[in-house]
Amino acid sequence: MNKSMLAGIGIGVAAAMGVAAVAGLDVFHSGPEYAQVISAKAITSTVKSPRKECRNVTVTHRRPVQDENRIAGSVLGAVAGGVIGHQFGGGHGRDVATVLGALGGGYAGNQVQGTMQDKDTYSTIEQRCKTVYDTSEKNLGYDVTYQIGNQQGKIRMDHNPGSQIPLDKNGQLVLSDSANKS
């Protein structure tokens, strides 16, 4: 082989390597590297979470009664009223006073027994529970409006892209989260 041929091969190899290096550096790529973000609006959903809320309350109970119709009070009151009414008047008037005393005493005895039964109570502490709902906002993503040159576009992303979105060699958005962090 002659020297000129070796020199030509060497220069050709060097030129080819130079072209490959320049192509690898993407020196000839003249398009934008980023899309400018015009707006990024968070999309949220309201989530309701149930939980149990309990509190202790004082409850007053009436003790059980054996004489719900208050017969004992009525009878004792009627006897006492009749005895007292019998002390007044004379003759037929005494009989009327005895009957009126028995009626009044029966009514009074009934009312006294009712009042006593109503006051015969006891209290307990009881737990009362109800379901309440806590609300919170869940982020579903972002509606992003971006611009590349004079063209605008919209896309939904799972994260806020910040002020710009990287573009690949073909001018397409690079949407991976790792590309935005580098």
Image (spheres, grey):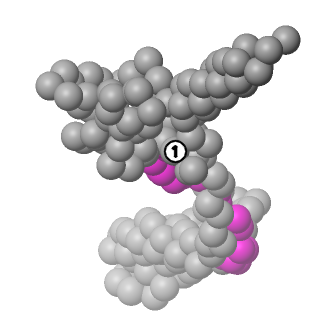
Q: Nearer the viewer, residue 107 or 23?
A: 23
Q: Nearer the viewer, residue 41 or 45?
A: 41
Quarter of the image that includes the N terminus? top right
Q: Which residue is mark 1?
A: 180
Q: Which secondary structure lies at badge 1?
A: helix
Query: Residue 58's image quarter?
Result: bottom right
Q: Residue 65 location, x and y as percent?
A: 72, 63
Most extreme residue toward the left is 150
Query: Residue 104's image quarter?
Result: bottom left
Name the residue rendered at 65%, 25% in the picture.
Answer: 11
> What's the magenta bit mostly, secondary-structure-wise?
strand
Q: How many marks?
A: 1
Residue 150, visible in the rendered structure: yes
Name the residue rendered at 71%, 74% in the picture.
Answer: 125
Location of residue 39 with respect to 113 vertically, above or below: above
Name the residue rendered at 57%, 71% in the picture.
Answer: 118
Most extreme residue toward the front is 2
Q: Nearer the viewer, residue 28 or 108?
A: 28
Q: How many C-alpha atoms fall within 10 Å of the one at disc 1: few (<14), some, or many (≥20)? A: some
Q: Residue 29 location, x and y as percent?
A: 40, 27
Q: Residue 178 location, x and y as percent?
A: 61, 42
Q: Residue 14 location, x and y as percent?
A: 66, 28
Name the residue rendered at 62%, 60% in the picture.
Answer: 53
Report whether 157 appears left or right of 22: left
Q: Provide the residue span drawn in magenta.
A: 121-139
Location of residue 33 with respect to 128 vertically, above or below: above
Residue type at mark 1?
Asn
**Is residue 116 in the magenta section?**
no
